[in-house]
Image: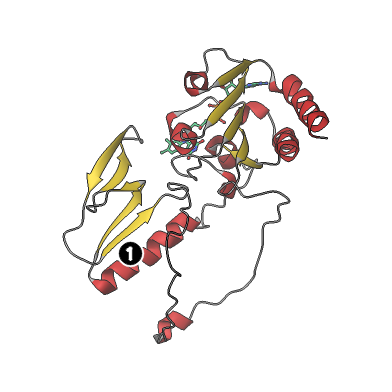
Amino acid sequence: MAPTERSPATFTLGIAAGLAARLDAGLNWDLVDLTSDFVGKRPALQDSVLVDVGWKTTPRLGLFRAGSFDAAEQETGQAQIVDVTAEYAEHSRSAKVVDHEQETSSGPSIEDADIIVAGGRGLGAPENFTLAEELARALGGAVGATRAVVDAGWYPYSAQIGQTGKVVSPKLYVALGISGAIQHKVGMQSSNVIVAINKDPNAPIFEFSDLGVVGDLHEIVPKLSELVRARRG
Ligand SMILES: Cc1cc2nc3c(=O)[nH]c(=O)nc-3n(C[C@H](O)[C@H](O)[C@H](O)COP(=O)(O)OP(=O)(O)OC[C@H]3O[C@@H](n4cnc5c(N)ncnc54)[C@H](O)[C@@H]3O)c2cc1C
């Protein structure tokens, strides 16, 4: 991502801060949970602990990390839709949309995917992300990435998983050439099943994987994709 470009999370925080100022309301951000008596949970110290945060007044504003909750079934009734008329101040109209760009993807997004194949620096080069893409396609999943490869410009920021990316909890998470740094772990540790392929038997990711494969991903992944394709059809 270009340094001047603002991530969606930064953009949302800007809107929430403006709203909090206008409503004279308290704002807690980067939350991952909320109790029924309005105690928010926010990760701190590089996500190694959760701190309790609260609000002194109402209304209470909170921003949650993407993927912190599973979508809930609607319990009863219909959502109520209220039409409101908004009045804009002159400065609110001064921004102009200069271009629209849509990311094209043939598979599900990482927020919605039941299966994620994530690639790290162990892929060795940006073009090797095709290994992750092929496996994801064979499994019907989405492709994720570590910050190391996003910062290196190998893959877009929208695929970044972790402390400064997205929090995901798919049924299956396949990590290719990912060391398992704490900042990555906090974004994927709630996945149901974690499979890691790494050539270093001491890589930290094996400490929280359900299945670990020690070996060179360049040899293993093409064969795995082929096997999955053959099994599926
Ligand atoms: C404030 C802060 C926020 C951060 N936020 C995030 C975040 O949101 N998300 C994130 O991911 N990181 C984040 N990081 C960075 C994080 O600390 C790590 O640097 C990063 O996750 C490492 O990425 P990686 O696993 O791809 O690379 P590396 O740590 O370099 O690991 C590469 C792995 O690939 C393996 N490997 C190499 N070649 C092969 C091969 N041929 N076959 C198999 N395995 C191979 C190696 O053994 C190694 O374990 C953050 C850091 C900071 C300080």
Q: Is residue 137 left or right of residue 198?
A: right
Please tell me which residue is depicted at 55% across the width and 35% down the height of the picture: 148
Q: How is the image coloured?
A: secondary structure
Please tell me which residue lies in front, 213 or 219.
213
Q: In terms of image quadrants, where is residue 103?
A: bottom right
Residue 223 in picture, x, y percent from top left: 78, 23
Q: Residue furthest left?
A: 56
* Residue at the disc numbered 1: 17
Please tell me which residue lies in front, 4 or 86.
86
Please tell me which residue is depicted at 31% across the width and 44% down the height of the picture: 42
Q: What element does badge 1 sit on?
A: helix
Ligand 1 within 8 Å, label 1 CB: no
Please tell me which residue is depicted at 59% across the width and 24% down the height of the picture: 196
Q: Is residue 208 above or below residue 158?
A: above
Q: Is residue 160 left or right of residue 9?
A: right
Residue 133 in picture, x, y percent from top left: 72, 39
Q: Residue furthest top?
A: 201
Can you say which quadrant of the picture contains the C terminus? top right
Dot 1: few (<14), some (14–19), or many (≥20) neighbours within 10 Å?
Answer: some
Please tell me which residue is depicted at 29% across the width and 38% down the height of the picture: 50
Residue 171 in picture, x, y percent from top left: 56, 36
Q: Is residue 106 left or right of residue 230?
A: left
Q: Residue furthest front?
A: 76
Q: Is residue 206 above or below residue 117?
A: above
Residue 193 in picture, x, y percent from top left: 55, 29
Give the amino acid at mark 1: Ala
Q: Is residue 164 left or right of residue 118?
A: left
